[in-house]
Image (tube, helix red, strand yellow):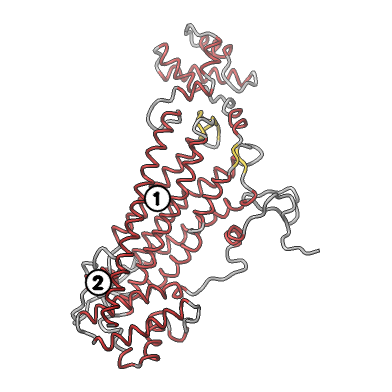
Amino acid sequence: MKVEKLWGGRFEELPPKEIVDFLSGRDVKGIPPCDERLIPYDLWGNRAHLFMLCQQGIVSKQDGKKILKGLKELESLYQKGMFKLDSSKEDVHSNIESFLINRIGIESGGKIHTGRSRNDQIGLDMRLYLRDQVMGYIEGLIELIESLLKRAEEHCSTLMPGYTHHQPAMVTTFGHLLLSFAEALSRDVERFTHWFALFNKNPLGAAAGYGTSFPLDRRLTSKLLGFDGPTENVTDPITQRWEPETELGYDIAVMMDHLSTMAQTLILLSTSEFNMVRLSDRHSTGSSIMPQKRNPCSLEVIKAKTAFAHGILVSLLSAGKGLFVGYNRDTQWTKYWVMDLVDETKPALPVMTDVIRLLQVHETEMLTQAEEGFIGATPLMEWMVTSFGLPLRKAKMIMEKAVKYSERFELEEVSYRSLMKALKEMEIDLPITEKDVKKIQRPERILSQKLAIGTPSVKRVQENLISLRGKVKKSRAWLILQGKRIQKARELMERMEKQIRN
């Protein structure tokens, strides 16, 4: 008998490999060196810098051809998995330059570093890496929001209790709840988009932080790399190397807070005590000893990763607190932190999207609980204010007494008898019937009375859906535009490469 897992016999479906990887973290697998991820970005930066040097007459076309040939050979080896970083050469920049010198000689290969420092090289590599991650987060957020909108439309009239302090408070719908998550995530999209406005600027040409006497064309390299333009000050991106990482870290931490809130809500709603939703087997795990267990582990891992994100953000912020002008080796560690942060959090978006897509909703149980816990007390109070002109504070005092008396009768809603007793005690005479008291507290009637913008009524939920779909459409268009701009930069790079080869 072969045993691969210590649980799973009670499940219809086991979590797939990507979910298992998400849940297991680093338990049985490691992570690659940070600079391995930067190889394609460093190659891109090298080519852009080379083309600019040739265009400016700083490096001859003949040397440019040799350097380009060496870079293309290295790129081919990397794509085949045959180029590995040598730790004795310290970093990705040194590895690539050493490869070139070994392949084509120092007379040509030694010219690639003209007008550069490793300071502006790493600043460039990281901005290119971070920019790709930002676009990936936006894409993941859009997919999750669309999943939420689809399920929200299905459940725009699915009644359930809304909560404050973990207790039933007011009637809402499951669709409205999902839209509240989608709206928070749409702000996350805006935050990630704003990263571009702040940091899609080219640091190449800053050298060690004070420029160089070579006549570099920073506008040209900006076009070749898909940036909005060069940084206006060359010292700033070197001194504040931590800042693009930290801005992304903040955006991620806020996003993870939103995902963690979703996770905790769904965990509680899926417990046997609430029994309003059921997670797919794909997002549940069993116990190595208890055969009945069905644990919401995907959601619990999202909460853990949120705590991780908070810690990384504090580390990133702290790296920028005591820097002297110019480069400080402190900021090297921001690379490790932000890459760890991306590794831990980025997969949370497709996981949560899958959770929402496969979520089973127990509509009958939701409605049952929307009729309990005196959830109609507030609408009944408001009806008394509207119908009889009572001051709200007086109406609330009446309802508090009515709730108290109903609890003594072990009821879950305000009874006519209790309300009459409360009115009599306060010496107030109102023409209220038992039918009124019952009708006003019905969840369907309560929902129909919520008319203001943003409330859970079906009409307002439909408006919210339309608005959020418009935002998603706009975000997708922005993402496509950025992709086209980067593709345009690569096409310009190819044209310049042909000029050098010919």
Q: Amino acid at mark 2?
A: Thr
Q: Residue 237, image x and y in percent?
A: 28, 69
Q: Residue 498, image x and y in percent?
A: 29, 78
Residue placed at 33% from the left, 65% from the top? 487
Residue 188, labelled with which disc?
1
**Total marks placed:** 2
Residue placed at 24% from the left, 72% from the top? 235
Q: Residue 87, image x and y in percent?
A: 47, 83
Question: Which one is nearer the viewer's eye here, 406 or 264?
Answer: 264
SS for callout 2: loop
Q: Amino acid at mark 1?
A: Asp
How packed is label 2: few (under 14 Cα within 10 Å), some, or many (20 or more)? Answer: many
How packed is label 1: few (under 14 Cα within 10 Å), some, or many (20 or more)? Answer: many
- Residue under label 2: 235
Query: Given the current orientation, which residue lies at the most extreme right position?
Result: 1
Mark 1 touches mark 2? (CB < 8 Å): no
In the figure, 211 relative to 259: above or below? Answer: below
Q: Quadrant of the C terminus?
A: bottom left
Q: Residue 118, image x and y in percent?
A: 33, 79
Nearer-N-terminus badge (1/2):
1
180 on left or right of 117: right
Question: Which one is nearer the viewer's eye here, 67 or 271?
Answer: 67
182 on left or right of 61: right
153 on left or right of 107: right
